[in-house]
Amino acid sequence: MYTHNLKNFDPDIYASVKREQKRQEEGLEMIPSENFVSPAVLEALGSVLTNKYSEGYAGKRYYGGCEFIDEVETLAIERAKKLFNAEHVNVQPLSGAPANIAVYFALLKPGDTVLGMDLSHGGHLTHGHPVTYMAKIFNFVRYKTNADGLIDLENLRQMAIEHKPKMILVGYSAYSREIDYEAIKKIADEVGAITMADIAHIAGLIAAGEMNNPVPIFDVVTTTTHKTLRGPRGGMIMCKEKFAKEIDKAVFPGFQGGPHENNIAAKAVAFKEALEPEFKEYARQIKKNAKILEEEFKKRGYKLCFGGTDNHLLLIDVTTKGLSGKAGQIALDKAGITANKNMIPDDPRSPMDPSGIRLGTPALTTRGMKEEEMRVVAKWIDEAITNWQDETKLAEIKNQIIEFTKKFPLYPTL
Ligand code: DSN
């Protein structure tokens, strides 16, 4: 049987994994959708559960030998229900995009209208962007934020009355404000629309009670499990009991085959972690850290989209500092800070070289960084952006960051 391990059998992949680990350890990870899972989550991901096929659902599998898989999946579901106060949960979606697609196919017919947020205003590709296949099947109509950077509920209502959507979709990947689910549900009820929220970015903050929870209010809520929720890469759908059958059927057999049970076990572990009191403190700190960044950037004259942040992320228009989002991302990379270029509302530039930089605090907060560290991080970001063409200065910042990160070890035992 097997006698080799990764290091001795495949030194190339081993070396790349180690280099990536070093990059994560020595840098400041500020892409708001990224985080660092616990060693317990990694252990579940790397477990023998990856060997098992288990099409179907607990107690109703197509293949034999699923008794322990059923235990794992049932625990994941029970924990998710408790975390979000959900009536029904499906933990099988492979990630956020498949989760959203499964919901569209479960609850809509081809040609149905969905009212979703414009991507440049903080929406998401899978919410009907014209480049996606879903946009060829369903009729997505896009709403935007107003001049103050907020969702204009009266405008949303007027659009709902005009377009009579089958579904109203909220939940965003770059929008930094709180969402009034009750008010949106009222609008949806007025026009007879299904309500869907994609909470991928803010799921951890919601689970910890740090942001409004749409799950008890909306018909269906999707999420990924690897962002603020700090689990493995994966997706999940929560819904009212009355949609449970359609949702489950759409995930399997409608859209996916065998679920990734190692991943589902890792989700269960992450949900257990999120139920611990420490996770509430973690979520509170994510928000506090983002507020400090907001304060520091405003102090330095940066233009923040949506006026600031209520969650874990900031969208900054860097063109007022004389560079594009792409140039900003490259400069930050050279300085040891990982962020991503991002469109800003009605961006006059192109998606590949937009005006904005998106920054988030979940990963740094996992490392134990707090307010004091955020002030130092903001200073480095400002220095890198201001000196984006000065290679020496960027290398200098990177060296300081390598020293700094040693105080916040990430995976000392791996
Ligand atoms: N790529 C994720 C994000 O960064 O927001 C969502 O698809």
Image (cartoon, rainbow, N blue to C red):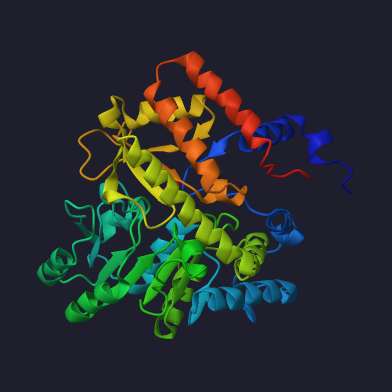
Residue 100 screen position, x and y as percent? 40, 62
Q: Is residue 258 left or right of residue 235?
A: right
Residues 88 and 50: in front is 88
Q: Is residue 329 left or right of residue 270?
A: left
Which residue is painted at 56% across and 25% down in the image? Answer: 398
Question: Could you tell me how many numbered marks the image carries?
Answer: 0
Which residue is painted at 54% across and 78% down in the image? Answer: 81
Q: Is residue 261 above or below residue 243?
A: above
Is residue 130 visible from the viewing direction of this image?
no
Residue 72 screen position, x and y as percent? 68, 72
Q: Is residue 16 left or right of residue 350?
A: right
Q: Quadrant of the C terminus?
A: top right
Which residue is painted at 61% across and 71% down in the image? Answer: 275
Is residue 217 visible from the viewing direction of this image?
yes
- The single residue placed furthest to the bottom in the displayed view is 242
Residue 403 screen position, x and y as percent? 65, 29
Residue 171 screen position, x and y as percent? 35, 61
Which residue is painted at 49% across and 17% down in the image? Answer: 393
Q: Is residue 70 above or below residue 313?
A: below
Residues 409 and 93: in front is 409
Residues 175 and 193: in front is 175
Q: Is residue 22 above or below residue 113?
A: above
